[in-house]
Image (tube, rainbow, N blue to C red):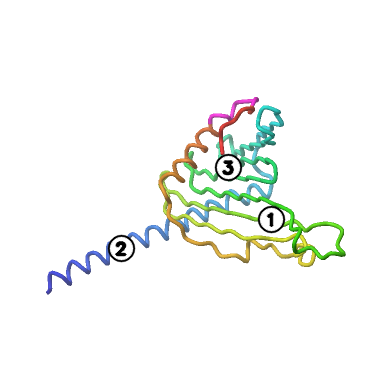
Amino acid sequence: MKLIITLFSILFLGIFKGFSQTKGSIKTIKEKYTIITDLLEKKELTQTILQSNCEDNNSKNIQIGFYYTDDVLVYINHTYNQGHNNYNYHYYIWDNVLIFYFSDHASWNWDYECAPKEQEYANEVWTYEEKRVYLVDETPIKCLYKTFEEKSIDRATNPEIELSSTIKNKNIDCNKTMIENILSSYKKLLALQDKEDICNLDID
């Protein structure tokens, strides 16, 4: 019986220690994230912007931004539009290591059914998806996801409300394929820092 209690105590302490370390790591990542975003907002980072409006990019309008402090890369923003879809990817870097990833995907369509008959136009319905990944040494320690819809008619009546901030994130499994795709895209972007031509990209 004592052996069982001892083993249980060791297991519990191990789990608690791991949880505490993860919580501490996330706090540190958030602090570094805040430093980077503050520099971005104050426009204190040196930036290099690559743009592509190439016809051979499957109608993609691509922009990639590299942001540096004292020639050290701290942030990459990769965006592109295609049809009714907008994609936005953010990579936050500290000491040349990716520490936080955030992506948001917005798509829209026309809502013909819910528009009043007297209204001469259809409402837009936007669907949003957001992912957040916290990483330590390129290993994910926490992954979050949220999705929500917004109608143009609602935005017109409540323009001051940022809907994303009212929706809670959900913890999701940091599956291997998702993380491999994130790291692969990140490394491909790193290789583009000295490029001028960004047509025919295979980065998603």
Residue 66 position within the rendered picture, expressed as x and y whole percent measured from the top left: 61, 37
Quickly name the residue at label 2. 15
Q: Position of residue 122 (x, y in %)?
A: 80, 57
Residue 193 is a magenta residue: yes
Which residues are drawn in magenta? 191-197
* 96 in relation to 135, above or below: above
Residue bearing the label numbered 1: 126
**Where the C terminus falls, by quadrant?**
top right
Amino acid type, label 2: Ile
190 sits to left or right of 1: right
Question: What is the quadrant of residue 73 in the picture?
Answer: top right
Closer to the chain start, of discs 1 and 2, is 2
Q: Which amino acid does label 3 sit on?
A: Tyr
The residue sitting at 59% across, 30% down in the picture is 201
Tell which tag, 2 or 3, sits nearer the viewer.
2
**Which three-letter amino acid code belongs to the residue tagged 1?**
Trp
Residue 190: which quarter of the image? Answer: top right
Residue occupying image coordinates x 40% and y 46%? 176
Looking at the rendered structure, the number of numbered marks drawn on it comes to 3
**What whole-number distance in Å separates the C-alpha atoms at marks 1 and 3?**
27 Å
Q: Name the residue under label 3.
A: 75
Q: Which label's residue is closer to the chain start, 1 or 3?
A: 3
Q: Of callouts 2 and 3, which one flags the residue occurring earlier in the amino acid sequence?
A: 2
